[in-house]
Image (tube, helix red, strand yellow):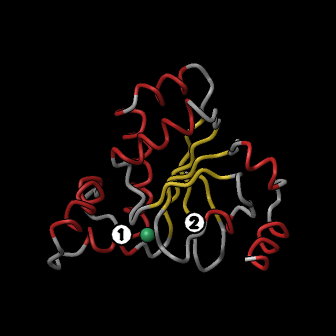
Amino acid sequence: MEKLNAIWNDNCQIDPAALAQGQKPFAAILSCADARVDPSWIFASGSGELFQVRSAGNTAFNDAIASMEYAVSVLGTPLLLVMGHSACGAVKAAMASNPLTPLLEDLVQPIRASIKPGEGLEAVIKGNVRAAASTLVAKSAVLRGAVERGKLTIRGAYFDIGSGQVSWL
Ligand SMILES: [Zn+2]
C-alpha cells in the first residue's frame, strides 16, 4: 500500500492534495476502448487533466452524452474532443457482414448508419467521428447551449496508431 501511494505521489502532475479537493479537466474526450488508444498517454496528461469517456467505436450513446453534460455543465470543461483511430476494430465490425452478438449489433449500429457507399476504412472511421460529434450537439441541449454561448468547443480528431500522430478533422 505504501508503495502504491509512492507511485501515485510520484506520478501526479497535479498535487494529490489538490486532486482530492476536486477536478478541473482541460478537455473531455470521447474515444475508443482500444488498448492502443490511451488519451492520457497520447496527450501526455496526468490525473485530473482529461475527462474520459471510452467505448469501442467512440459512439455518442446516451450515457456518453450524459457524462459529457456533467463535464461541461458541472466541471466547466471548455473542450470536447471526439477521437477515432486507425484500424478501429469496432468500425471494421460495422463494415463487415459477420454475425455479431445482439449487444455488439447495438454497439455498431450507429457506426453502420454513418457509412457512405464506397468508403474505405479510414474514411468510415473519420465519418464516424463526425457523426458522433454531431450527435452530441443534436441530442444534448446542454452541450448545444454551451457551444452557442462560446463556452465549449467540440472538435473531431483521428489518431494514427503507427505514427502516433493526431490530426484534426
Ligand atoms: Zn477502436
Q: Indicate the secondary structure of the residue bearing disc 1.
A: loop
Ligand 1 falls in which quarter? bottom left
**Circle number at residue 91:** none
Residue type (three-letter) at the residue carrying disc 1: Gly
Quick check: 150 above or below 58?
above
* Residue 101 in which image quadrant: bottom left
Task: Name the residue: 62% across, 35% down.
Answer: 75
Could you say where residue 161 lies in the image, as x and y percent from the top left? 58, 76
Quick check: 111 above or below 7?
above
Left or right: residue 165 versus residue 138 is: right
Residue reaching furthest top?
149
Left or right: residue 80 versus residue 32 is: right
- The residue where tag 1 is placed is 120
Could you say where residue 157 lies in the image, as x and y percent from the top left? 56, 55
- The residue where tag 2 is placed is 159
Task: Name the residue: 37% across, 54% down.
Answer: 59
Tell me the crowding category of disc 2: few under 14, some 14 to 19, or many 20 or more residues within 10 angstroms, Cα based: many
* Marks 1 & 2, CB-CB < 8 Å contact: no
Q: CA distance from mark 1 to mark 2?
A: 16 Å
Could you say where residue 82 lies in the image, as x and y percent from the top left? 51, 51
Quick check: 130 above or below 152?
below
**Closer to the N terminus: mark 1 or mark 2?**
1
